[in-house]
Image (cartoon, grey):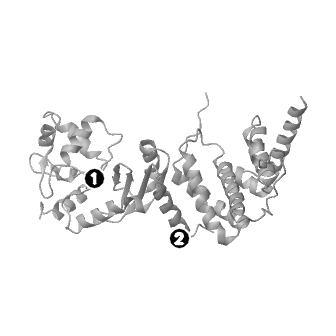
């Protein structure tokens, strides 16, 4: 016997309604593969191209607290906005962001990153300069690589000074797909 | 120095115990009422989960909550808890509350076995499931707990 799906779903919804969860997550389908999406009461905490929950639960618990539960309802808004983005109907995300566990400089860089608009790109050096440290292009590269919320914080829009795509935490194929979706690449 | 067992994410705890807790509740309150009792059990566990100091005996812990929910289910329905005879006590407190205090000094496994057996009237099979051991070991833990209590009472 396993717990009937309907009962399981009801419990997870009740857990969300109770407001007692430290974080909720779900696996969301997208054109760039299944994504693990996690959110807290403050906002979006994680998007990962590795959708295996087991690889993330400990980290989520360490960041937000032990009451982490797969709770589709808690990431409904994220799922909806991602769907709209991939259908080309959304250029900006209206989601709260939870940058817990991120260093102050990374947080500043990610805040600047969030201002790079849909369909445009910036170089690593430009993003470093906008974050107040023009010499930190390499550090910015590392921060992009470890971006906890890819797609929504658009590190795919950051490219090399010579126009090359350079790299992407989720693999260059995905970076290309996203830039093509935004009309940057043909 | 011994490291305390890290508290697992709630998701892991739920996955590990949901099925057997539901089976236990169905046996105790019947299929119709088991769903509500199940939700209640894990919501209570979720409420307390953030305050857990360590991750030992989580299985016994969730069964204790489930047993408590069973009692409340009968009480709410105004039915006598036929399956859970309540031991009469002078100050009217239920047995499991009193036992909780009485058994404070026992080793954790014996304490859990005594409270589940005499406070909640669980069978040794159920206690074995809760403590992740065998029915024989559960019976042994309960009886050695009782022996220890008797000895303490005499001194």
Tell me what residue is drawn at x 65 percent, y 60 percent.
Answer: B21
- Residue under circle 1? A150
- Of marks 2 and 1, which one's residue comes earlier in the chain? 2
Q: Nearer the viewer, residue B90 or B9?
A: B90
Q: Residue furthest bottom?
A: B32
In space, the residues marked 2 and 1 are separated at their CA atoms by: 32 Å
SS state under label 2: helix
Side of A137 where A95 appears, left or right? right
* Residue under numbered circle 2: A6
The verdict on a common chain for dots 2 and 1 is yes
What percent of the width, then of the height, locates residue A137? 16, 38
Residue B31: percent from the left, percent from the top?
67, 71
Task: State which quarter of the image contains the N terminus of chain B.
Answer: top right
Indicate the secondary structure of the residue bearing disc 1: loop
Q: Return the x and y of residue B75 as percentages of the image width and height.
A: 72, 60
Pick the front one: B7 or B50? B50
Question: Chain letter of disc 2?
Answer: A
Q: Position of residue A160 (x, y in %)?
A: 13, 47
Residue at x-position 61% and y-position 62%: B38
Q: Nearer the viewer, residue B139 or B41?
A: B41
């Amino acid at each position: 016997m396993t717990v009937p799906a309907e009962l399981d779903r009801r419990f997870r919804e009740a857990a969300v309604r109770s407001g007692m969860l430290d974080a909720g997550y779900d696996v969301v389908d997208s054109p760039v593969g299944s994504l693990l999406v996690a959110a807290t009461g403050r906002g979006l905490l994680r998007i990962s191209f590795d959708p295996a929950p087991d690889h993330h639960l400990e980290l989520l618990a360490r960041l937000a607290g032990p009451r982490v539960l797969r709770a589709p309802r808690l990431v409904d808004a994220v799922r909806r906005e991602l769907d709209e983005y991939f259908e080309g109907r959304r250029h900006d995300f209206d989601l709260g962001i939870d940058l817990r566990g991120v260093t102050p400089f990374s947080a500043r860089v990610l805040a600047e990153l969030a201002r790079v608009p849909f369909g445009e790109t910036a170089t690593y050096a430009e993003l470093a300069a906008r974050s107040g440290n023009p010499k930190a292009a390499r550090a910015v590269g590392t921060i992009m690589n470890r971006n906890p919320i890819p797609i929504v914080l658009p590190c795919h829009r950051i490219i090399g000074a010579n126009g090359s795509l350079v790299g992407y935490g989720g693999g260059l194929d995905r970076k290309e797909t996203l830039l093509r979706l935004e009309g940057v690449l043909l | 120095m011994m490291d305390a067992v890290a508290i697992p994410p709630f998701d892991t705890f739920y996955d590990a115990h949901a099925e057997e807790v539901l089976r236990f509740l169905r046996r105790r309150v019947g299929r119709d009422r088991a769903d509500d009792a199940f939700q209640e059990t894990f919501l209570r566990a979720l409420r307390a989960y953030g305050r857990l100091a360590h991750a030992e005996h989580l299985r016994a812990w969730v069964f204790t909550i489930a047993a408590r929910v069973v009692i409340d289910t009968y009480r709410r329905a105004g039915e006598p808890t036929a399956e859970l005879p309540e031991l009469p006590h002078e100050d009217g407190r239920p047995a499991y509350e009193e036992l909780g205090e009485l058994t404070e000094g026992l080793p954790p496994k014996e304490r859990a076995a005594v409270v589940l057996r005499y406070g909640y009237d669980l069978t040794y099979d159920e206690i074995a499931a809760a403590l992740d051991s065998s029915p024989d070991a559960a019976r042994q833990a309960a009886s050695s707990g009782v022996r220890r209590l008797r000895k303490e009472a005499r001194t």
